Image (tube, grey):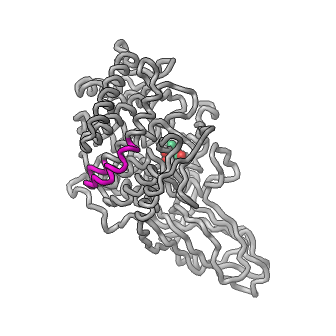
Amino acid sequence: MPQEKAIATITNSIADFQMITNDAFLEKAERLHPQIHHHPVRPSSEVTVRWEEGAWRAEEKGTVEEALERRYGRGDSLILDFGSHYVGYPHIVLKSVGSPQDAPAYVAVRFGETPAEIGESTADYHGSISSSWLQESTSHIDVLPGEIPLHRRYAFRYLQITVLDTSPKYRLMIDDVTVDTVSSADREALLPCREDLAEDLKKIDAVGARTLYECMQDVFEDGPKRDRRLWMGDFRVQALVNYETFRNFDLVKRCLYLFAGACMNRGQVGACLFTAPRVQVDDTALFDYSLLFVPTLFEYFEASGDRETLAELSETAFTQLRIAAERLDQRGIVRDDPSWWCFLDWNSELNKQAGAQGVYIYCLRYGLDIAEVLGDEREAALIRERLDFACRSARESLWEPDLGFFVSGEDRQVSWISQVWMVLAGVFGREENCALLRRLKMVDPRIRLISPYAHHYYVEALCRNGMAAEITDYIRGYWGKMVDAGADCFWEVFDPLDPDASPYGSKAILSYCHAWSCTASYFIRKWL
Ligand code: RAM
């Protein structure tokens, strides 16, 4: 695939962007600011990283004590392994030995969630998103003993320290290395998974729960390395896993209030939010992400029983459905366009029209649930009407009986994700849905699922259609393969057929602890 095709368009700032705030909602979100749990962690060994059999691998070199006894001069380097993935603030104290320190120590540090980020040259990075996400830093230390000044929070398992210079008269030693790890998830609160599960599934569940733990910070972050922010699509699936694991309802509630408290034009929920220096919705609108506020709100109510929040935020949910309805053409089909208007997945060849229609219908159903629970008959009637229209239109304009698939866009593309969302939308009944899912597997259309996020919705479609018996093998074959490849947390992108795939044109910039991939734990705990 040519490079330009592999790199996704990730900007779609809207020209007349405005932020619409609701101060009462933002104040509620502020009051729900989570407590952050701190745990100090030390490295567990020294490793070397090298390229072997087509991948960067870490190999044990010795103990941390041995590394701390060594003296380091210009050009020397060491790599410490913390034994698993952590998010936190590292403290690295250096001291000088030999003659008095007659020049600053000049050191570089690099952090890697995987050995690849240590092995690959960051100077060669030419990806489509900022290189500033690469976790490295250089600094001068004028007075030793002293700490390497690191102000950022890092997400990593591996830490490389390289001495760029000392002086001919003194050497460096490492006095102490710790990391103050942080998460708003209480690790004591993690519900145990079923005892009788097979060991490999327990391992997959543990990696999923760890992924969520690492991403639970001030908000549900998409990835603690990158983008470190609240994305609606990621948040929806994180909340689902959270209900089965840490059950931190307040963090979900906080994020719901943040999205509702800082909307885009006309009250549209933004694709993502920043929380510092102040709450700010990004100027990116994604059709599916805005809509996913609706199921996220309803599922929060189902899990927590918090009817007050459901009532207070219902108008925000209904607004998303109204705005989405405006995008329908006269046939009742979501209008397509060449920009990055809808997400669904990272497949750069994917046409989003049919998938978007599916998301719209799926979210209408949750909207109906909300209206019914609240006894809002007027809204319920309106949604029922929209539902009928959108389903009928999908059957008439997007269903291709000769192919046995839903088609998308002008070129009538058949993709995996279009079928998945149409099944989830319930455009047909269960029997037809099951037949469609079986046909999908058999025919295996070329436009396949790339991100763990898209794989989530495929597995969800199986579960909701009584095909949960098939998910065990699927979880093993997808999330299990990441574990086999050494994942401490699940990755942002994983395509078993193209292990080097990256939507940003580089593997070094990928997030290897990415929230939307933690949902194996949800399926294992809720559906197996
Ligand atoms: C990336 C992140 C995020 C995702 C968006 C669409 O920036 O991976 O998790 O939700 O894309």
Of 278 and 448, the residue lying toward us: 278
**Residue 485: horizontal and vertical position, in percent?**
45, 50
Residue 483: x percent and y percent? 40, 51
* Residue 333 sits above or below residue 19 on the image: above
Q: Is residue 114 visible?
A: no
Q: How would you classify the magenta stretch by its main secondary structure?
A: helix
Q: Residue at x 26, y 49 (%)?
A: 302
**Most extreme residue toward the left, as rendered?**
196
- Identify the residue shown where x is 35% and y is 47%: 297
Q: Is residue 307 magenta?
A: yes
Q: Is residue 196 left or right of residue 233?
A: left
Residue nearest the observer in this picture, 335 or 189: 335
Q: Quadrant of the N terminus?
A: top right
Q: Residue placed at 38% from the left, 51% from the top?
A: 238
Residue at the outermost top position: 402
> Which percent across, then down, holds residue 498?
50, 37
**Front residue of this view, candidates 238 and 319:** 319
Single out the residue that lies furthest toward the front.
Answer: 378
Question: Observer-nearest residue: 307 or 273?
Answer: 307
Within the image, what quadrant is residue 209 found in?
bottom left
Tell me which segment is drawn in magenta.
Answer: 299-317
| Residue 44 percent across, percent down from the top left | 47, 71
Q: Say if the magenta span includes residue 384.
A: no
Any part of residue 136 in sight: yes
